[in-house]
Each structure stands twice: as structure tokens, then as C-alpha cells.
Image (cartoon, rainbow, N blue to C red):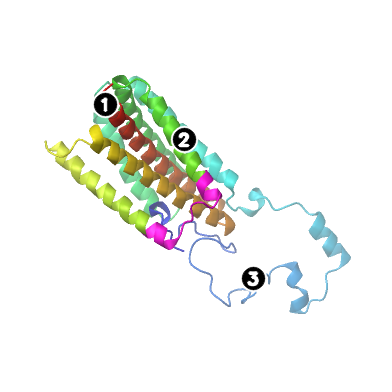
Amino acid sequence: MRSSNPVFSREGSFTREPGYAGFGPTAQAGGPHGNNPYAGSPYAQQSQGQGPLTDEQLYAMYNGPSAGPGATGRMTLDDVVARTAMTLLTLVAAGALAWFTLPFKNFGFAVGASLIAFVVGLVITFRPTVSPALIVAYAALEGVFLGAVTHFLNTLWPGIAVQAVLGTAAVFGAMLFAYKSGRIRVTPAYTRIGIAVGLGFAVLLLINSIAWWFGGGLNTWSGPLGIGVGLIGVAIGAFYLTLDFNEIERAIAEGAPQQEAWRAAFGLTLSLVWIYFEMLRLIASLRGDD
């Protein structure tokens, strides 16, 4: 199953292990158990001509240990939360290190880290298997970039770092509530429109950044334009969070392998980094006259 989320969109994302129902190529009808999905279960023995279960078999079934995540190897919500916490802690630690060690206003290291993070992100997205080391490395590189940028902006507008963190947390909480309560439904039309807007926005920002580098371009960090760009950017990041929630929910329901929790953590981290950066832009524009 191909996902709408760019992080999960390659073929085979949340690939299932043999015997698991999950994301990946659709199981063929008439496979190992034909069209009966319960054919491998003891309950199906009667229909296979093996007779009813004995008292000993029933006792063993009902008194055996429950199949938790460690026994089944399937992804759970706890797995996603734990791995997302690891990536975010790595990002924060790297950001703090950059804040206190990198030279002020020297963005050479920060820009270099962001470019490397971009390449690592592409590798993670299109890599056929999940690499926790690459995902942690991506978080660390993004942390260096955001730490340096935040330090500079926080010197111009004291408190902007705390405001951006609180704003990002508020957006995450609001979108999670809206998604879980059914106020937002991830439909095909919703997904197509959102992705089109997001891609167009990213391309325009890239073109403007290149133009600004050569002495042209528009200032998207102050005034009404900065406020508008920041609001659109935060909204797009919030949209991608809903895609993340939807894909994670579906992956858990369909029995994706436990290792895929790292890919889910990467998708959430990517969306949160985007929202935080755009939140910095928005707050800087609002406080431009301070």
C-alpha cells in the first residue's frame, strides 16, 4: 500500500514480515491458507477435518502467555512513542550543543548540517530497510541547524525559543485531538489538495531562498509577508502531522513490524521540525518591531 505521506510514500513502507498483515504489497488470494485468513488458527481445525479441540488444547490456549509486542514483533503505539522520544531528545541535545558552542552569527556549520540532514533524510525515505542509526543522525544534524538559528533569533528577540517550542507543542496537541476526535478525516481529496499546496509552498520558498542568496528575493522573516508565510508553513506542517497519525494508526492496525516504529518516529520528527522552523518565522515576523 502506497502512502500519501512523502516519508511513507515509497513502495513497501511499513513492510510486513512474512505472516503479518501490514503495509506493503497486498497478499495474494489463495496464498498459504487460501482465502481463509483464520486457516492457521486452532479454531479452523474443525473445518479442516481435524475434529474438535480437546480439553487439554483449550486449556493450553486460554492459559498460555499473552502475545505482546515482544512476542509478536509487531509495532505498537508504545514503540512509536519511545522511538520518537529518542529522536527528539537527540535533536534537543544537539541543538543545545550548537547553541553553546558554535560561533554566534556563523551559520556555516548550521547550513552544512542542514544540507547533510536533507541528504540523510532522502536516504532514509528511499532506503528499502529502516536504519535507526541514520534516523538518529538526521535528528542530530537538524538539532545543530535549529540550535544555531534559534540562538541567533533568541538574541534578537529574547524568549522566541520558548515561544516556538510552546507553539509547536500546541499545534501537535491540537492536531492529535482533532484527528482522534474525528474532526479531521484523512480522505483522498484532503490528501491530494494538502500535498499539492505543500509541494508548491516548498518550491516557492526554495526559489526565493536561491534568489535571496544572490542578492534578490523577498524577505519572508518580517512584515505581513513573513506573517503570511509563517501561518501557511505552520498549517502545512499541521497537515502533514495528520498524515503521520493516519499512517501510524493504519500500520499498527495492520501489524507492521516493530522495526517500522523508527520510520514512524522519523516522519513525526520531520513534521515537528518543519512546524518549529515555521513557528520561528511567524514569531519573528510578529515581533519584528520589538
Q: Amino acid at mark 1?
A: Gly
Q: Is 182 included in the stretch rendered in magenta?
A: yes
**Sequence-wise first label, 1 or 2:** 2
Q: Nearer the viewer, residue 233 or 23?
A: 233
Indicate whether 132 appears above or below 168.
Answer: below
- Left-right relation of 182 to 217: right
Q: Secondary structure at mark 2?
A: helix
Q: Residue at x 31, y 45 (%)?
A: 119
* Residue 83, x across and y down, in percent: 52, 41
In what element is the residue under mark 1?
loop
**Residue stretch rendered in magenta on the structure:** 177-192
Question: Badge 2 is on which residue?
Answer: 169
Q: Residue at x 29, y 24 (%)?
A: 152
Identify which amino acid the numbered label 3 is placed on.
Pro
Amino acid at dot 2:
Ala
Residue occupied by mark 3: 37
Where is residue 62 drawn, in percent x and y? Answer: 81, 57
**Residue 288 image label:** 1
